[in-house]
Image (cartoon, grey):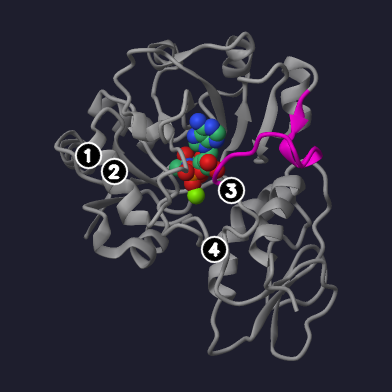
Amino acid sequence: MRVVPADAPGITAAAKILRDGGLVAFPTETVYGLGADATQGTAVARIFEAKGRPSFNPLIAHIADPAAASDFAIPADQFEALTRAFWPGPLTLVMRRKPGSNISDLVSAGGATIALRCPDSTAALDLLCAVGRPLAAPSANRSGSVSPTSAEHVAASLGDRVDLILDAGPCRVGLESTVLDLTQAAPVILRPGVVTREQIAAIVGAVAAASDDPSAPKSPGQQLSHYAPSLPVRINAFDARAGEALLGFGAGEATLNLSEGADLREAAANLFAMLRRLDDPRHFKAIAVRPIPEDGVGVAINDRLRRAAYRKTF
Ligand code: TXA
Ligand code: MG
């Protein structure tokens, strides 16, 4: 596995590997993605193999130009307004696949829908333009572990399973994109992210969250245990118990602090990197996390923390 800067020569080398059917990990504003040419089924199959990802879990297709969305999907009514407000950016839109589109069926895990996102990162957009094709890209980690927010995280998780890693430093947002399903009568948030329910509702009116209703559709990737470190995680903790690391938020002593100034965006950007740093069985037996307010970006942070803590709380 090679790690190169996401500069012009790096992008050119990465684009060649992708056109030849290889795998390249690349930075986006949210987390690093594990990219393959979405139009080559064998390349997309390599993503599932490298991640150890179940084949029923569909992938996001990344595009550089919002206008290209209609080549791959049947744009939903709310598409124009949402993309004007949030693209490029951390919002993924699930729509019906356009019949006859050249995106591999594997990207949709054989289903009738396709998730599209235009990332807000110069490196990602340059790469997409250089390849000239949509890129299927899940987070660049082994299935079930914490998403990578740096090239080092990708190398530690995937090693030689990836042909090249483009390095542009730490990701600005740090949490995966908001996934919004536009195939229902009203939009449904399948995965919360830094584009919040309030922001989406201001554009399209009523928005449901899959978590409101247990029978509502969910992303296949939203299992209860996900994004999990190897140590147990205890959420809504005020103090560390013996042997625990304390992940702080706001004022107060802690092993590491997501944001001393209680800034939710700063906390989101730090979350995965700090969970990784504390996930060290030589020093700690568990990770306790101070409460995070359940509003705005806090909804997405708590969503990831609940999954990290699931069945590992003691
Ligand atoms: O920020 C992100 O979204 C990052 C960067 C690389 O773009 N990507 C990412 O991909 O987080 P992944 O595969 O780790 O998560 C995508 C989520 C999964 O929960 C998956 O089940 C869901 O989106 N998803 C993808 N296609 C879908 C579809 N057609 N219908 C419903 N959910 C879908
Ligand atoms: Mg993922």
Give neighbour class at mark 3: few <14, some 14-19, many 20+ (Cα, 10 Å).
Answer: many
Contact, mark 4 vs mark 3 (Cβ under 8 Å): no
User: Badge 3 is on which residue?
Assistant: 175
Above/below status of 311 relative to 69: below
Q: Which residues are magenta?
A: 207-222
Q: Earlier in the sequence, mark 3 or mark 1?
A: 1
Tell me where residue 166 appears, x and y as whole percent. 30, 49
Residue for badge 1: 42
Residue 29: x and y in percent read 50, 41
- Work out whether mark 4 precedes mark 1 in sequence or the reverse, and give the earlier one: 1
The alpha-carbon separation of the residues under discs 3 and 2 comes to 25 Å
Q: Is mark 1 within 8 Å of ligand 1?
A: no
Q: Nearer the viewer, mark 4 or mark 2?
A: 2
Mark 3 close to ligand 1, CB under 8 Å: yes
Distance, label 4 to label 3, CA atoms, is 11 Å
Image quadrant in which the C terminus is located: bottom right
Q: Is residue 9 left or right of residue 25?
A: left
Residue 257 percent location from the top left of the image: 70, 68
Principal SS element in the magenta part?
A: loop
* Residue type at numbered disc 4: Ala
Residue type marked 2: Ala
In the picture, the disc for residue 273 is 4
